[in-house]
Image (cartoon, rainbow, N blue to C red):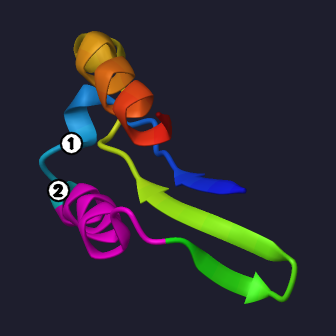
C-alpha cells in the first residue's frame, strides 16, 4: 500500500506554507526505500510530495511518477 501525502496549494500561499512543503519532503527522505509494517499483513510506503499547483504541474508529475515506480 502506498500512502501519498499531496497538498494542492494556490500560488499566493506557497511562501507562507513553505514549512508544510518542507515537511512533506522530509517524510519522503526519512522513509525513502523503506517498507513499514503497521498491521501484520499490510506493508506501507509513505511518500510526501511537493505542493501541487497549475504552475508546477509538470514538476509535480515527475515527482509523483518517480515516487511510485
Label 1 neighbourhood size at 10 Å, few (<14), some (14-19), many (20+)? some
Indicate whether residue 53 is drawn in magenta: no
Instruction: Write down the quadrant of residue 34 in the picture.
Output: bottom left
Spatial CA span between label 2 and label 1: 6 Å
48 or 33: nearer the viewer: 33
Q: Residue at x 31, y 21 (%)?
A: 62
How far across and how far down the image is residue 48, in percent? 40, 55
Report which quarter residue 8 is drawn in.
Answer: top left
Determine the residue positioned at 28% across, 11% down. 58
Q: Quadrant of residue 66?
A: top left
Q: Position of residue 65 (x, y in %)?
A: 42, 26
- Please say if 63 is above or below 56: below
Placement of 29 over or under 2, stated as above or below: below
**In the displayed structure image, the side of residue 64 where residue 13 appears, left or right:** left
Whether 38 is drawn above or below 60: the answer is below
- Residue 22 tag number: none
Give the percent coordinates (x, y) of residue 61: 38, 19
User: Which secondary structure is most common in the magenta stretch?
Assistant: helix
Q: Quick one: label 2, few (<14), some, or many (20+) residues within 10 Å? A: few
Q: Is residue 38 left or right of residue 55?
A: right
Badge 2 vs badge 1, beta-carbon distance below 8 Å: yes
Residues drawn in magenta: 19-34
Residue that protrudes farthest toward the right in the picture:
41
Give residue 55's position: percent from left, percent from top.
24, 13
Circle on res. 14: 1
The residue pinned by badge 2 equals: 18
Q: Residue at x 73, y 86 (%)?
A: 38
Amino acid at each position: 500500500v502506498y500512502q501519498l501525502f499531496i497538498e494542492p496549494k494556490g500560488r499566493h500561499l506557497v511562501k507562507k506554507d513553505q514549512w508544510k512543503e518542507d515537511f512533506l519532503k522530509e517524510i519522503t527522505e526519512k522513509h525513502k526505500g523503506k517498507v513499514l509494517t503497521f498491521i501484520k499483513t499490510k506493508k506501507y510506503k509513505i511518500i510526501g510530495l511537493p505542493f501541487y499547483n497549475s504552475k508546477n504541474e509538470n514538476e509535480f508529475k515527475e515527482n509523483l511518477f518517480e515516487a511510485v515506480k
